[in-house]
Image (cartoon, rainbow, N blue to C red):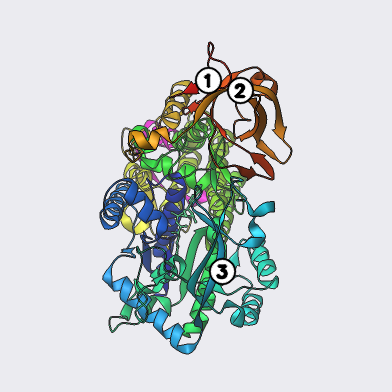
Amino acid sequence: MSKTYYVTTPIYYPSGKLHIGNTYTTVLCDTLKRYKALRGYDTFYLTGMDEHGKKIETVANDRNIAPIDHVTEIAEETRALWDKLRISYDDFIRTTEKRHKTVVQKIFEQLLEQGDIYLGTYKGYYCMPCESFYTETQLDENNTCPDCGRETSQLEEESYFFKLSKYQKRLLQFIENNPDFITPETRKNEVVAFIKQGLNDLSVSRTTFDWGIKVVSNPKHVVYVWIDALSNYISALGYGTDQNQLFTKYWEGDEVVHVVGKDILRFHAIYWPIMLMALDIPINFKLHAHGFYMMKDGKMSKSKGGVIYPDTILKYYGLDELRYFLLRELPYGSDGVFTPETFVERINFDLANDFGNLLNRTLSMINKYFDGYIELNEEAETDFDKDLQQTIKDVIANYKENMNTLKISQALQEVWRLISRSNKYIDETMPWVLAKDEAKKNELENVLYHLVESLRHIGILLRPFLLEATPALFQQLAVEDQFTTWESMQFGDKKSYHVVKKPVPLFPRLDVEEEVNRLKEDISGKPKEEPVEETPEITIEDFVKLDIVIGQITECKTHPDADKLLVSQVNIGRGETRQIVSGIAKHYKPEELIGKKVLVIKNLKPVKLRGVLSSGMLLAGSNKETLEVITSEKLNPGDIVK
Ligand code: ME8
């Protein structure tokens, strides 16, 4: 019986359109599944959507639609995207599905009954504009928000807690006994250090919003998103139901791999194994936490522009170009950057030049010198041949090692080592010189045979990666299916070749300038489906509550503790000066503002921003590129704006 292999992606939040970051993880898992299938494993690939939580509820409210309609729309879009990218997933789980909810409810009740979950009080601080909760230790001085510097409000809420602390020792022991449980090593070290600081019990329910799975025994609580989300890996397999054949086969089978980004390492390396321990489910999985793709100017986010989407790449280039770039460019264990320049270069250098030309040159020569037909000729072996054959063997061994340890970019580099070696072999053996001498016909045939056999091996190794180019390669070399298997990777296995007459380039060369500009334009554009922000209607009574006056800035300095903030002294007439802190330091030097007559909201409740008192607010307008403080020319400090 074949060994089993179960691979999963995180289930993504439907908070916006998925970008190439999420696509990376999904393509990576697809490649792993295809690789294992090539190696004869019985595979199962799970992906899906994490559809509950406050954030999703808010996004749906902002769009004025029901949360379920919002998440269904994004789930359908996401499936359509994965289908377009030919992702070979076997199941797509949505946490709003009944099959998932019943399992989560059962798990929660079991943990409650066992005493691993208990009812307590959650004390935290909430920053309304950032919609984030913080613990006391995370706050800045004066209990302000560590992200935006504004005041937070203290919050006490009844909540269920999961006794993580009870399992701390066992988890550390488990990690020690299973040194390859978490890869890369650096991430494992982070996790161990974090656990050693001591685990706090985890709040696992909420009463402040509805969009979640209700706790059966106390329905005013919904299960907080991580217990809900993590359970997907087993609920999709039917755990806890009488339809649990997939669970028995794959979860309790031979290999299970969760692939995630570094952002959710802790949840998967700590909460998830502890949940499994508490439920007495075997921890069979290995966890791989990869780095992030960044844009040149920083992080990618689903709600922000300046990001590259997989559809953009597919619109202009092929699926294989996208897959190759993503899997090749992110180094093992660290972050990578997407730039239009590197994308176009990778296609031109690696795919069109190195790989494409090798095939082209080989096919042209076989047609030119042998009318398309050549055979293995064992007698004419040279040192160059032996070296090429050895490279093939070494590359296969290293590729295998890299694939098994999820060093995907290195596995591709190994294939390209063979491609380069084969190109060099052409320069060394100089077939065009051999062709001039009739006595060297055998030697020439042997050289071309080596090249075509090398290309067949390259094609097999690239099968999990390039979905369109490898069948095209095999078709041009006229390789029968039985010689495209992993087992057929023996030099000389296919004894003769009758190749096509007219080679077709696998990857067209791109015009660098044109394509870089095209991609840049696309990246700077707003994401197409970004929801339009709508603000609620107000009445004139609401508006007149604002006391807006002209003020003149007399002094301005940067905030002592926050690079983004400026502290201005503003004369607002009648001898009154106000100190106002504004987040405009990115757009103005302090001296540029001195003397400017600006619009000030006078009756805004004073707040301390990063420890500095701010009594009022300056009005400014902004768009994607810039921000401008609104100024007046003719009016004087104290004049009223209405
Ligand atoms: O965290 N580069 O969902 P999410 C590479 N619902 N990978 C990236 C990336 C980037 N720039 N950005 C995102 C969630 N990813 C939870 C998961 S699982 C039980 C619940 C990938 O939509 C990466 O795999 O925020 C990361 O971990 C995941 O998307 C986060 O997706």
**Label 3: how many Cα within 10 Å (few below 14, some 14–19, many 20+):** many
The amino acid type of the residue labelled 3 equals Ala
Query: What kind of element bears circle 3?
Result: helix
Residue drawn at x 39%, y 74% as measured from the top left:
234
CA distance separating discs 3 and 1: 60 Å
Determine whether, in the image, residue 340 is placed left or right of residue 145.
left
Q: Dot 1 lies on which element?
A: loop
Residue 573's disc number: 2
Which residue lies at the image location 34% right of the left edge and 46% below the top edge? Answer: 62
Helix, strand or loop: magenta stretch: helix
- Secondary element at image label 2: loop
Q: How far apart are marks 1 and 2 (CA)?
A: 8 Å
The part of the image, by quadrant, that contains residue 596 is top right
At which x and y percent is residue 45? 37, 64
Q: Mark 1 points at which residue?
A: 639
Disc 3: which residue: 269
Measuring from the top left, give residue 228's x and y in whole percent. 41, 69
Label whose residue precedes the other's in the sequence (3 or 1): 3
Going by the numbered disc 1, the residue's amino acid type is: Asp
Q: Nearer the viewer, residue 109 or 245?
A: 109
Does the magenta run of residues contain 506? Answer: no
Query: Magenta segment range?
Result: 359-379
Find out if the beta carbon at label 3 lies less than 8 Å from the nearest ligand 1 atom.
no
Depth check, front residue: 511 or 76? 76
